[in-house]
Image: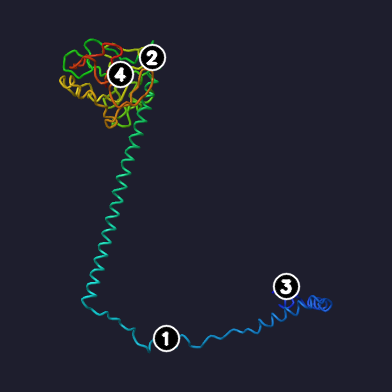
């Protein structure tokens, strides 16, 4: 059926929204216009049909009659399942299947947890180790810049706190012998502010603790061995300068063969070369970060990375250490804390 447009005034007329004068004027216009007459007849017929639809009265007492029928029917019937061997067997089997399914769910959940731990934990450990290694290399790079600035101010000399023939970098009970731990030679970097922060001397992979910044100006050395994580070139013998072989290692993660100057091996094992291949403990024995004289920080997985394959943990031709030994040449690396 095609849609038909109506003059809105006609609808207002039939709904009684027009005043008496408006109704009279509109009726005169309807009488004069055949199209309005047709629209008026259609609207009149539609409204007459709507008025013919009267609401159906609700049934009286329907709710009460339904409730009475329910009460008259009595209580709901009780269903009794017959008991026999077959139904008992099926019921027991069903309970067993439910229990097995439950335990299977538990085992599956546990397996997923084990899988997640097995895959996730090594990944997290690897990320943590990588982060620590990068932090360590950053620290060594900052220390390297401090060494170069120091050398620029002191005629190419490397940081050095002084030494005499009676000094010892190893703990000793000999009277009149001053102990000068090799780490003390790094202290001028901190004391003269070429390295501004004591935390730069701490490897993130170690449990060492930086010395308080407020004590730096009051001291001539680090208060404790744990205030430094890195091993510095042994300055008790021939000391290199900034003009020495640029491949020379001058700083690295701590030496695994010495503990605060005390050797952890004997002469017999040194000759056999067992411990000499050990890596630093700073990164789980996987290797060590190393700073060369040219200021380059590299990751190495073997300690034989000095000039011409020199072992960076030991002195050439030395099998017993008393604390007064030092390099005999400017290319003999011996990194010591």
Marks 3/4: CA–CA distance: 101 Å
* Relative vertical location of residue 17 with respect to residue 151 in this rendering, above or below: below
Which numbered disc covers residue 306? 4
Q: Residue 80: give x, y in percent of width and height.
A: 27, 81
Q: Earlier in the sequence, mark 3 or mark 4?
A: 3
> What is the image's colouring?
rainbow
39 to the left or right of 152: right
Numbered disc 2: secondary structure: helix
Q: Earlier in the sequence, mark 4 or mark 1?
A: 1
Marks 2/1: CA–CA distance: 106 Å
31 to the left or right of 116: right
Residue bearing mark 2? 151
Marks 4/2: CA–CA distance: 21 Å
Marks 2/3: CA–CA distance: 101 Å
Marks 1/3: CA–CA distance: 52 Å
> What residue is rendered at 76% in x and 78% in y?
40
* Of 305 and 18, the residue lying toward us: 305
* Of 269 and 162, the residue lying toward us: 269
Which dot, 1 or 3, sits closer to the camera? 3
Numbered disc 3: secondary structure: loop
Q: Earlier in the sequence, mark 4 or mark 2?
A: 2
* Of 96 and 25, the residue lying toward us: 96
Q: Residue 196: give x, y in percent of width and height.
A: 39, 24
Residue bearing mark 1? 67
Which numbered disc covers residue 258? none
Q: Earlier in the sequence, mark 1 or mark 3?
A: 3
Judged from this view, the residue extending furthest toward the bottom is 72
Numbered disc 4: secondary structure: loop
Instruction: Quadrant for residue 69, please give it.
Output: bottom left
């Amino acid at each position: 059926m095609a849609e038909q447009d109506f003059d809105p005034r006609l609808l207002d007329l039939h709904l009684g929204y027009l005043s008496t004068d408006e109704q009279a004027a509109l009726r005169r216009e309807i009488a004069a216009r055949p199209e309005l007459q047709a629209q008026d007849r259609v609207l009149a017929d539609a409204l007459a049909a709507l008025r013919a639809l009267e609401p159906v009265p609700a049934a009286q007492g329907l709710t009460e009659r339904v409730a009475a029928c329910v009460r008259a029917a009595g209580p709901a019937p009780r269903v009794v399942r017959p008991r026999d061997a077959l139904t008992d067997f099926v019921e027991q089997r069903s309970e067993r299947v439910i229990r097995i399914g439950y335990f299977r769910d538990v085992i599956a959940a546990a397996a997923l947890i084990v899988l997640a731990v097995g895959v996730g934990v090594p990944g997290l450990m690897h990320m943590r180790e990588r982060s620590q290694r990068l932090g360590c290399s950053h620290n060594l790079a900052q220390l390297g810049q401090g060494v170069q600035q120091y050398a620029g101010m002191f005629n190419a000399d490397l940081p050095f706190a002084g030494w005499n023939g009676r000094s010892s970098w190893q703990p000793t009970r000999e009277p009149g012998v001053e102990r000068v731990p090799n780490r003390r030679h790094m202290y001028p970097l901190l004391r003269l502010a070429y390295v501004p922060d004591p935390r730069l001397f701490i490897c993130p992979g170690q449990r060492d603790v930086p010395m308080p910044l407020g004590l730096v100006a009051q001291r001539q050395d680090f208060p404790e061995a744990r205030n430094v994580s890195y091993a510095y070139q042994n300055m008790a013998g021939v000391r290199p300068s900034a003009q020495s072989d640029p491949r020379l290692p001058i700083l690295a993660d701590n030496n695994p063969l010495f503990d605060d100057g005390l050797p952890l091996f004997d002469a017999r094992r040194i000759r056999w070369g067992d411990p000499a291949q050990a890596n630093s403990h700073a990164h789980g024995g996987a290797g060590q970060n190393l700073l060369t004289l040219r200021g380059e920080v590299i990751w190495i997985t073997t300690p034989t990375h000095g000039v011409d394959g020199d072992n960076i943990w030991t002195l050439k031709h030395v099998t017993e250490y008393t604390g007064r030994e030092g390099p005999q040449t400017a290319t003999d690396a011996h990194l010591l804390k």
